[in-house]
Image: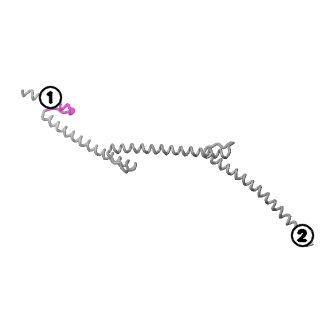
Amino acid sequence: MKRLVSSLVMATLLFSGISVVTAADKATDSTVTHSKAEKREENRAKLNAKAAKWGVETTDQTNKVVKAAIQEAKAAKKAENAEKKAAKEAKKQEQLVKLNDKAVKLGVDTAGKTAKEVKAAIKEAKVAKKAENAEKKAAKEAKKQEQLANLKEKAAKWGVDIAGKSAKEIKAEIEVKKAEKKENKK
C-alpha cells in the first residue's frame, strides 16, 4: 500500500509540476500584458500632465501628436524668453548710453567702469557741481551787496534819497544829479 500511495503521489507531483509550469507561463504572459497596459497608462498620464503644464490640448490626440505639440510649446517659450532677454539687454544698453551721456556732460570718466560705478561717479559730480553753484551764488550775492553798499555811499555823497528804490532807480537819480552839476558849472 505504501508503494501504491507513494507512486500515486509521485505521479500526481509529476503531472501537477507540468501543469504548474504551463499555468505559470500563462500567468506571466497576462502579467506582462497587464504591465504593458499599465505602463502605457502611466506614460499617457505623465504626458497629459506635461501637456497641461505647457497648455497643450490632449483630447482625441495620439501620444506622438501631443509630444510634438509640447515640443512646439517649449520652442515657443524658448523663443519668447530669448526675445525678452534681448529686449532687456537692449534696454540695459540704452540706459548705459544715457548714463555715459550724463557722465560726459558732467565731465566724468567712464572708461572701464560698470554702470553702478558710473552712477556713483555721476552722483558725486552732481554734488560737487551743486556745491560749486552754491559758492558761485554766494560770491555773486556778496558782490551784489558790495555794489549796493558802494551805491548807497554814492547816493549819500550826491544827496539822493534811497528809501524804497531799486538800484537802477538810485543809479538813474545819481546820473541826473551829476548832469545837473555839470550844467551848473557851465
Q: Determine which residue is flagged by label 2.
A: 7
Front residue of this view, candidates 91 and 120: 91
Residue at left 63%, top 45%? 68
| Circle 2 SS class | helix
Residue at left 67%, top 51%? 43
Horizontal relation, residue 20 to residue 72: left or right? right
Image coordinates for residue 100, horizontal then vertical, percent: 37, 45
Extreme-right residue of the structure = 1
Front residue of this view, candidates 150 and 133: 133
User: Is residue 164 part of the magenta span, yes or no?
Assistant: yes
**Type of the residue with mark 2:** Ser
Which quarter of the figure is the C terminus placed in? top left
Q: Determine which residue is flagged by label 1.
A: 176
26 versus 176 height, above or below: below
**Type of the residue with mark 1:** Val
Image coordinates for residue 93, horizontal then vertical, percent: 42, 44
User: Is residue 3 part of the magenta span, yes or no?
Assistant: no
161 versus 22 height, above or below: above
Horizontal relation, residue 154 to residue 36: left or right? left
Residue at left 68%, top 45%? 62
Range covered by the magenta-colored residues: 159-173
Horizontal relation, residue 133 to residue 10: left or right? left
Image coordinates for residue 47, horizontal then vertical, percent: 65, 48
Circles 2 and 1: CB distance less than 8 Å? Answer: no
